[in-house]
Amino acid sequence: MPKKFTAVVAREEKWYVAHCVELGVVSQGKTIEEAQANLKEAVELYIESFGSEDLPLSLGEALLYHIEVPSGG
């Protein structure tokens, strides 16, 4: 049975960086789609290496938003 995890993709200069929140697995790609595919592969390899018995559950619904704060002094 497939497991669901939360993933976040953010642009960092010339790359898109994808992060699996629950597992701490990170990957990257030159496009969003490439970063997503690379993260999926990295998560699959992580599960193969460490097993799936004690994997954390998905955090469920996630909300991603920007905040604005003053920039210091």
Image: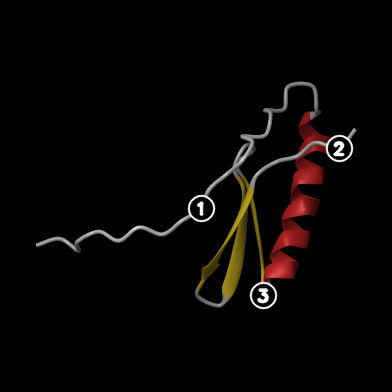
Residue 28 location, x and y as percent? 65, 63
Amino acid carrying mark 2 in the image: Pro
Please state which of the two labelled residues, at mark 2 or mark 3, is closer to the viewer. 2
Query: Gap between marks 3 and 1, in whole Å?
Result: 22 Å
Residue 33 location, x and y as percent? 74, 68
Q: Secondary structure at mark 2?
A: loop
Q: Quadrant of the C terminus?
A: bottom left
Q: Earlier in the sequence, mark 3 or mark 1?
A: 3
Between 16 and 65, the one nearer to me in the picture: 65
- Give the answer, above or below, for where 4 lies relative to 68: above
- Give the answer, above or below, for where 69 lies relative to 62: below
Q: Are marks 3 and 1 in contact (CB under 8 Å)?
A: no
Q: Secondary structure at mark 1?
A: loop
Amino acid carrying mark 1 in the image: Leu
| Residue farthest toward the left in the current orientation of the protein | 73
Q: Quadrant of the N terminus?
A: top right
> Circle 1 is placed at which residue position?
64
> Circle 2 is placed at which residue position?
2
